Amino acid sequence: MARNFKDLTEREILALAVSLEEEDGRVYADFADGLRETYPATAKLFDDMGAEESGHRASLIATYRERFGEHIPLIRRQDVKGFVQRRPFWLTRPLKISEVRKQAEIMELETRQFYQKAVGPRNAAPGHSRGYGCNRRFYTPVNDCNGDVSTTIDG
């Protein structure tokens, strides 16, 4: 049964963050794989983004283990009410560059909103670890990377 985000414990929010980082990294890897032949520079960008997600995930796991121990419960986006379910278009081929760009921007926005919610007022109260190590995360949408999209990725 899906739970409300506001009802999740600190431990569960951090476990969810680990799951979201894993999912995003895998989606970015799929984007890279689907674009590599036609848009190699964009594929490299998504390879790098996937590696960055992996680093975020590793950091979150280390924070989780330090605070709560080894076992990280499985909590996914579909286990929390209000999370947008993603249509897995990254599994179709050929990928359309415009759709990939749009989806990457949406994913980054969703992640930013998740972390803003996770470090919201209830988590800043005494006894809570503000951000659970997540507040080091800063995102820039794909089309804001030092110029317009055409200067940062193929197409």
Image: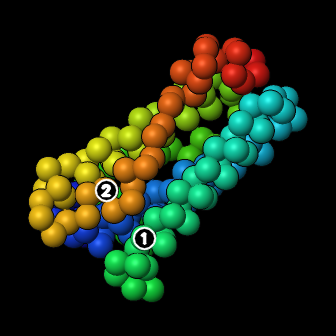
Mark number, residue 120:
none
The image quarter containing residue 26 is: bottom right
- The mark nearer the N terminus, 2 or 1, is 1
Considering the numbered disc 1 on the image, is that residue within a helix, a strand or a loop? helix
x%, y% of residue 136?
A: 43, 49
Residue count near mark 2 (Cα–Cα under 10 Å), binned few <14, some 14–19, many ≥20: many
Determine whether, in the image, residue 85 is placed left or right of residue 142: left
The quarter of the image holding the N terminus is bottom left
Toward the right, the furthest residue is: 37
Q: Residue at x 54, y 21 (%)?
A: 144
Residue lying at 69% horizontally and 14% vertically, measured from the top left: 150
Q: Is residue 91 above or below residue 57?
A: above
Q: Is residue 23 visible?
A: no
Q: Residue 8: x and y, percent? A: 21, 66
Could you say whether the residue bearing mark 2 is in a helix, strand or loop?
A: loop
Q: Residue furthest front?
A: 126
The residue tagged 1 is 63
Mark 2–mark 1 distance (CA, rounded to whole Å): 10 Å
Mark 2, residue position: 131
Picture mark count: 2
Which residue is at 62% across, 32% downward? 100
Residue 140 in view of the camera: yes
User: Residue 61: x percent and y percent?
Assistant: 48, 71
Q: In the depicted view, which residue is nearer to us: 59 or 82?
A: 59
Which kind of residue does numbered mark 1 sit on? Thr
Looking at the picture, how far across and down is residue 47, in whole percent? Answer: 72, 45
Which quadrant would residue 77 be assigned to in this image?
bottom left
Task: Report the quarter where the C terminus lies.
Answer: top right
- Amino acid at dot 2: Gly
| 29 is higher (above) or lower (below) than 45 | below
Q: Residue placed farthest to the bottom in the image?
A: 70
